Image (tube, helix red, strand yellow):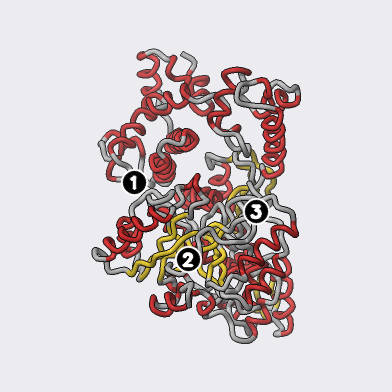
């Protein structure tokens, strides 16, 4: 048996072990070539990704992804945990997941992973990242054309072979080609949601392999930007070598791209880079790596006026180094109120920091009501009562139930009969919970700007969220007029996921946003800041302009399940990037004030 080859197969293609004999496996164990925790984590992560693509059980998929992080973060030997049958003592590891880990430990893969690899076409992970490429399409193209890679898919489209497959056509073929171009353009950028998960894994990895004084995520992730092309981590340490060794051993690392005495950059499997900065001046380096250059340069100018020298790894007055306890201390030494990470972008934040500061910037704990929530009456996964109990458990004092209106037939939109059933269900649920339930709708804005229920129905709601769900490709003038007509309707409404974007997948709708905001300033309307990490709508530049015009906001989760409530921090940080204060956000108010303000007939 070639143990060197076997070990390489373990890293590159764990399913190769299924061809080994029982004696091979015993010999493999005896020679201490069992997979380490990172190889086990990679197998769990692959299982999670494949389950997610399969689409049948997203919670199970997430459990495998979280399990990968748990195993990767172990401080004790995985061998010992398995031998002592203690895997289920780990957070998030149940009997089923523990059994999978034991299988991976013994044979390099689990039965589930082997089944998924057999069930799903080769190359499905990469192909599924192309916009428009559903699992059904990937399977059909693999069956008829043997397509297993992005390059093969592109070539088949260019040669006109895809259009000949049943269920496809010339238009679909062109859509796929457009998706491939979009994927390549965005290949080195990922969603904030995914970047947060990867960066947390990297953080745990470094902490587990080294002893560091302090370690923090910096860069665009810490500013909570929607799209990320680089993970930046700042580490306080006197010795960079162990840190760099840990970074190089990170399972998602594909190659080292750059390195000097204090920093190292690697390329990850997701196409983005990860850079680690090691310093003995943690606070100043963290400020510099979190901020955009314009912010740090202006901060240096203000420091110089105080006879201070501010550099990424240096903060001193004359020849004397200034000792600081953290980032806030640096700002205070320069005579400024501390600037939150989300606002370090080089606009007017330092001028504000010289004056009042940011103590009243919106924070997660300020939110009192969960808004824009769907139930099983439309396309939600949980009942009214389930959603109410979950929101109450979070400490919310009110919840708006806003299922879809009739035109959203694809999402189970409610006609008048179903709406009456829903209202009865809300009243029944209200008797069983302490949280206040408000009857609402996510009402489609129709192509002509009208709302999707007649006035006599609209006036009976407690809250209306008005959203565009169709006809996204109206031209600039048509879309502008559509939204202007809606805003002029004399019923209070909240403009839901305002520009309809899907991050990295669909551009914002094309309209004159400034004109619409101008109309909203005098109309009975507010703007939703949508916390769905795939939407994150509306962009900070427009939210800032809306705030200047005196327009109010709600921060919603657009929840279609109880788990979606967990998206709330994304919306809060998006609002903070726009400088939005507590008083600007309606659902920081108590239920009486909120309900009175948003009532359509008010």
What residue is rendered at 40% in x and 38% in y? Answer: 57
What residue is rendered at 66% in x and 55% in y? Answer: 508
Please report contact status of discs 2 and 1: CB closer than 8 Å, yes or no.
Answer: no
Q: Is residue 218 visible?
A: no
Q: Pointer 2: what residue?
A: 458
Task: Give left or right: position of 123 versus 34.
Answer: right
Residue 397 on image: x %, y %: 35, 71
Location of residue 139 by image quarter: top right
Q: Which mark is residue 515?
A: none
Q: Which mark is residue 92?
A: 1
Q: Estimate how packed mark 2 is, as few (under 14), some (14 to 19) or many (20 or more) residues with alpha carbons within 10 Å.
A: many
> Regarding mark 3 in the picture, which secondary structure is present there?
strand
What residue is rendered at 74% in x and 57% in y? Answer: 476
Residue 372 on image: x %, y %: 46, 61
Residue farthest to the bottom, as pictured: 355
Location of residue 542 by image quarter: bottom right
Taking depth in this image into account, of 267 and 186 the one nearest to the observer is: 186
Tell which circle, 2 or 3, labels the residue nearer the N-terminal end.
3
Please report contact status of discs 3 and 1: CB closer than 8 Å, yes or no.
Answer: no
Q: Pointer 3: what residue?
A: 263
Location of residue 593 by image quarter: bottom left
> Regarding mark 1 in the picture, which secondary structure is present there?
loop
């Amino acid at each position: 048996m070639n143990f060197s080859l076997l070990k390489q197969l373990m890293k590159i293609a764990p399913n190769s072990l299924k061809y080994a004999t029982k004696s091979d496996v015993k010999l493999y164990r005896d020679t201490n070539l069992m997979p380490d925790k990172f190889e086990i984590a990679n197998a769990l992560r692959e299982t999670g990704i494949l389950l997610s693509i399969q689409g049948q059980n997203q919670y199970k998929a997430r459990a495998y992804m979280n399990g990968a992080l748990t195993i990767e973060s172990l401080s004790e030997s995985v061998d010992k945990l398995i031998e002592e049958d203690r895997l289920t003592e780990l957070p998030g590891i149940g009997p089923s997941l523990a059994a999978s880990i034991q299988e991976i430990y013994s044979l390099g893969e689990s039965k589930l992973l082997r089944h998924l690899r057999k069930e799903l076409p080769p190359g499905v992970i990469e192909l599924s990242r192309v916009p428009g490429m559903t699992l059904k399409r990937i399977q059909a193209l693999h069956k008829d054309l043997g397509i297993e890679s992005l390059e093969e898919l592109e070539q088949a489209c260019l040669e006109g072979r895809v259009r000949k497959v049943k269920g496809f056509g010339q238009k679909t073929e062109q859509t796929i080609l457009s998706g491939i171009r979009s994927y390549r353009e965005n290949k080195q950028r990922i969603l904030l949601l995914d970047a947060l998960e990867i960066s947390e894994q990297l953080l745990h990895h470094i902490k587990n392999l080294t002893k560091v004084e302090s370690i923090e995520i910096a860069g665009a992730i810490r500013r909570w930007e929607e799209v990320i092309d680089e993970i930046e981590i700042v580490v306080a340490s006197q010795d960079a070598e162990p840190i760099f060794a840990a970074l190089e051993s990170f399972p998602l690392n594909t190659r080292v791209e750059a390195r000097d005495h204090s920093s190292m950059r690697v390329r990850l499997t997701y196409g983005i880079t990860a850079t680690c900065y090691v310093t003995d001046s943690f606070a100043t380096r963290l400020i510099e790596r979190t901020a955009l250059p314009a912010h740090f340069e202006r901060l240096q100018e203000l420091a110089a006026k105080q006879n201070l020298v501010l550099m990424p790894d240096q903060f001193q007055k004359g020849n004397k180094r200034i000792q600081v306890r953290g980032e806030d201390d640096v700002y205070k030494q320069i005579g400024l109120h501390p600037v939150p990470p989300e606002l370090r972008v080089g606009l007017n934040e330092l001028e504000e920091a010289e004056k009042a500061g940011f103590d009243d910037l919106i924070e997660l704990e300020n939110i009192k009501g969960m808004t824009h929530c769907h139930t099983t009456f439309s396309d939600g996964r949980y009942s009214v009562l389930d959603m109410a109990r979950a929101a109450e458990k979070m400490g919310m004092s009110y919840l708006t139930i806003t299922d879809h209106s009739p035109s959203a037939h694809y999402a189970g939109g409610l006609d008048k009969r179903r709406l009456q059933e829903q209202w009865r269900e809300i009243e029944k649920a209200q008797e069983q919970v302490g949280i206040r339930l408000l009857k609402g709708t996510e009402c489609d804005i129709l192509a002509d700007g009208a709302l999707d229920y007649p006035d006599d129905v609209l006036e009976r709601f407690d809250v209306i969220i008005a959203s565009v769900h169709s006809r996204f490709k109206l031209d600039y003038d048509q879309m502008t007029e559509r939204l202007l007509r809606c805003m002029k309707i004399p019923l209070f409404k909240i403009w839901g996921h305002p520009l309809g974007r899907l991050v990295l997948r669909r551009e914002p709708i094309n309209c004159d946003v400034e004109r619409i905001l101008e109309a909203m300033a005098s109309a009975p309307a507010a703007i939703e800041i949508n916390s769905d990490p795939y939407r994150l709508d509306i962009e900070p530049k427009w939210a800032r302009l809306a705030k200047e015009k005196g327009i109010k906001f709600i921060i919603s989760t657009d929840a279609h399940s109880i788990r979606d409530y967990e998206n709330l921090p994304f919306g809060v940080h998006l609002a903070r990037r726009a400088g939005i204060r507590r008083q600007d956000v309606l659902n920081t108010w108590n239920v009486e004030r909120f309900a009175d303000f948003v009532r359509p007939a008010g």
